[in-house]
Image (cartoon, helix red, strand yellow):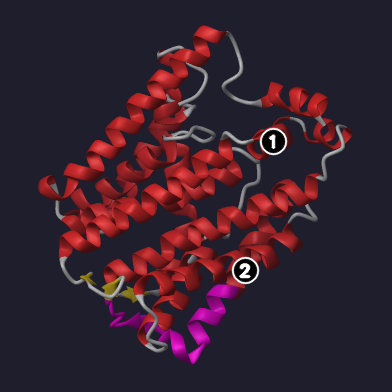
Amino acid sequence: MSDTTTEIGEFEENTGEPEHRTRSRIWQGVFWVALIGFLLIAPTLFYPVFVMQLLCFALFAAAFNLLIGFTGLLSFGHAAFFGGAAYIAGHALKVWGFPPLLGIAAGTLFAAALGWAVGSLAIRRQGIYFAMITLALAQIVYFFVLQMPFTGGEDGLQGIPRGHLLGFIDLNQPLAMYYTVAAIFLVGFLVIYRIIHSPFGQVLQAIRENEPRALSLGYNVDRFKLLAFVLSAALAGLAGSTKALVFQFASLTDAHWQMSGEVILMTLLGGMGTIFGPVVGAFVVVTLQHVLSGIGSWVQVVIGGTFIACVLLFRRGIVGELARLLKINSL
């Protein structure tokens, strides 16, 4: 196993000359300090609910990037996990009376179970067929969300209570809610970071780069892809459950195919296959949506134009191009 692990290590993004690896670690440390610093001071600079929305979508994009950027699987149906978890968490909090963390856990577990069901079917195919299967199954989930009585139909699930964290922290207080969301985001992002830099993450990158070679080394490729799919779905569900708690409602928009398109846009804009790229991409897209909200539907035109410009000028995404300019292997 040690020999195969060594060969798989050739696929890891931060392989290369020692000085390149050291430079990558230094710049990653800079990004971590900047991210944590932003989380600490953000509520004093911006409206807390806006920053919480940023963090929810940043975690969603990072979860999606784990699948497409580090495993090479393009899913057009990730909104099913994001939106489905939002509804389950909201129902658990509002109807079953779950405390906040248990409600979020219920939504996350539902997304993981749904990810296992969808992934078990989808990984039987590759390429565009895989993407189309995920889209079709996500549309089935959207239909159920629209028709099931407990979801509220077109009105959505409203009036989700925030409750008290650990029984005594009132989440109706903006700062208490903000730092709870910041902690959830940080834990989720750390999990993704650890997965990427683990031997399991190296195998995923090997599958992305050369699946037949990974198979020839004795790895059960389908099992690894399914596990990656379930992890990505669960983390997307964590983001969706948290968003439902923040805004106190779950809507059809969360489970619509357009949401899957938005998370793809965020990931590609920030830098697919980078660590911090999806976070930056989510910040750019959500910020543009808020700043340009006054122009109505034209905001989609502006975002589309921005995406086209970035694809033409920055093919690696914002963070990917920054890593190239800094001459480092990963960021």
Q: Is residue 152 magenta?
A: yes
Residue 132, image x and y in percent? 67, 57
User: Does the stretch in magenta take in 105?
Assistant: no
Q: Position of residue 126 (x, y in %)?
A: 76, 48
What is the three-letter code of the residue carrying label 2? Leu
Image disc number at residue 158: none
State the image coordinates of residue 225 (x, y, percent, origin top left): 71, 48
Image quadrant in which the C terminus is located:
top left
In the rendered structure, which segment of residues is drawn in magenta? 141-163
Horizontal and vertical percent position of residue 169: 22, 69
Quadrant of the rendering where the N terminus is positioned: top right
The answer to whether any part of residue 149 appears in the image is yes
Category of crowding for the residue at label 2, using alpha-carbon neighbours closer than 10 angstroms: few (below 14), some (14–19), many (at least 20)? many
Residue toward you, 241 or 142: 241
What's the mark number on residue 208? 1
Residue marked by disc 2: 114
- Whether residue 83 sits left or right of residue 97 in the image: it is right
Q: Residue at x 59, y 43 (%)?
A: 68
Q: Amino acid at mark 1?
A: Arg
Residue 58 shows up from this direction: no
- Mark 1 to mark 2 CA distance (whole Å): 23 Å
Give the mark nearer the N terminus: 1 vs 2: 2
Is residue 165 placed above or below 153 in the rendered structure? Answer: above
Q: Is residue 288 left or right of residue 214?
A: left
- Of residues 113 and 25, the one nearer the viewer is 25
Q: Give the structural element (helix, strand or loop) at label 2.
A: helix
Between 288 and 218, which is closer to the camera in this rendering?
A: 218
Could you tell me which residue is drawn at 49 percent across and 63 percent down?
Answer: 237
